[in-house]
Amino acid sequence: MAATPASRDRVVDAARALCILIVTLWHWTLSVTHRTADGSLTMPNPIHAVPGGWLATWVLQIMPVFFLVGGYANLVGWRRAQTRGTTAGRFVRDRLRRLLWPTAVWSLVWLAGELIAAALPGPHRWMWEWFPGYLTPLWFLGVYGLLIAAVPITASLHARYGAWVLVALVLLIALGSVAHRGAGLDWAGWATAALVWLFCHQLGYAWRGWELGRRSLAQRLAVAGAGLAALVALTVGAGYPPSMVSTVGTESNLFPTNAAIAALAVFQLGLLILVTPAAERLLRRPAVWKPVVALNVGALTIFLWHMTAYLVVLWVYEGLGGTLPAQPTAGWWAQRWLWLVAPSAVLAVLAALFVRAELAARRPRRGAGR
């Protein structure tokens, strides 16, 4: 902790840790996980049952921040690679290794389990057939991997054209939105989704490259205000759902990802840079900084294995005679402590076992500077 360089942006590390924490706790405690008629597991959230609950999703839908932090970190890494003379190919391979090694370990463990289950007597259903929600969070890894591969190009565009890249992406997102929502072209919706996540990642470049956290209060307020205004305009004036997470009975802003998530990214970036001065002072305290460091050490491990921990507790809970309510009843709310404590204990064991893969993937390879 004392060896943390003075130049390191602790707010970015704290934002990454917060993302991991919110995603994990959301899936564990704010999923109304229950069995369907065919015995499958589904995990809607209770936002539809909480008056005004959609407003919380403007902060708790944290996926845009993942990409903001990723863009920031990738720009730092790319600039460092250029300084050291590292080739673009080496940079991309090293970055992808950090992502793919822990994911490969997770995949192999689950594949082995699936194959053993398939070999046992009786009918077998694959994970994606009976609990697709388990795999849903992993879409992030595929999208982020593609963005890493594009860093040499996107970072160069940022360096050369700056804000014009963001303007071009906003225009393309607007065109794609019109084609999807206006003309009913499904392919345009998915093309727009790719542009939105590229926009979020590019915003991370702006965060780092323009040192937005160091700007005047008026400028930081302007960023947050622009994002908020765009969110209000899209949800109130353009008919986009007000909830930023998939909600029972409504259209989703996330699948496919649309312009509302792009606006949310600007708003959340504004919130991050608004709190930067105060957060930097707070994060200088060892009692605050140490948990941030701990979460960052195994961030990907936690992301990969938190649903496994949740599933283990689900199996034990049902095995002991517990039933999973299909609605967020008073009894369901009263049990939220259990779905925080029990999966945390299981995840601690899994993280201790598998964090080594993440740490090994981060070690620099011999000749990485050539």
Image: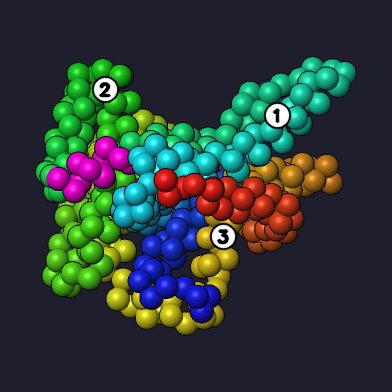
Could you say whether the residue bearing mark 2 is in a helix, strand or loop? Answer: helix
In three-dimensional space, the C-alpha distance between marks 3 and 2, rounded to whole angstroms, equals 38 Å
Which residue in the structure is indicated by mark 3?
297
Amino acid type at mark 1 = Leu
Out of 136 and 88, give the one closest to the viewer: 88
Residue 20 position within the rendered picture, expressed as x and y whole percent measured from the top left: 51, 55
Residue 84 position within the rendered picture, expressed as x and y whole percent measured from the top left: 36, 54
Residue 331 position within the rendered picture, expressed as x and y whole percent measured from the top left: 66, 54
Mark 1 / mark 2, whichever is N-terminal: 1
Amino acid type at mark 2 = Ala
Which residue in the structure is indicated by mark 2?
188
Which residue in the structure is indicated by mark 1?
111
Q: Is residue 320 left or right of residue 179?
A: right
Mark 1 / mark 3, whichever is N-terminal: 1
Q: Are marks 1 and 3 in contact (CB under 8 Å)?
A: no
Q: Give the extent of the magenta segment.
A: 151-160
Q: Residue at x 34, y 49 (%)?
A: 85
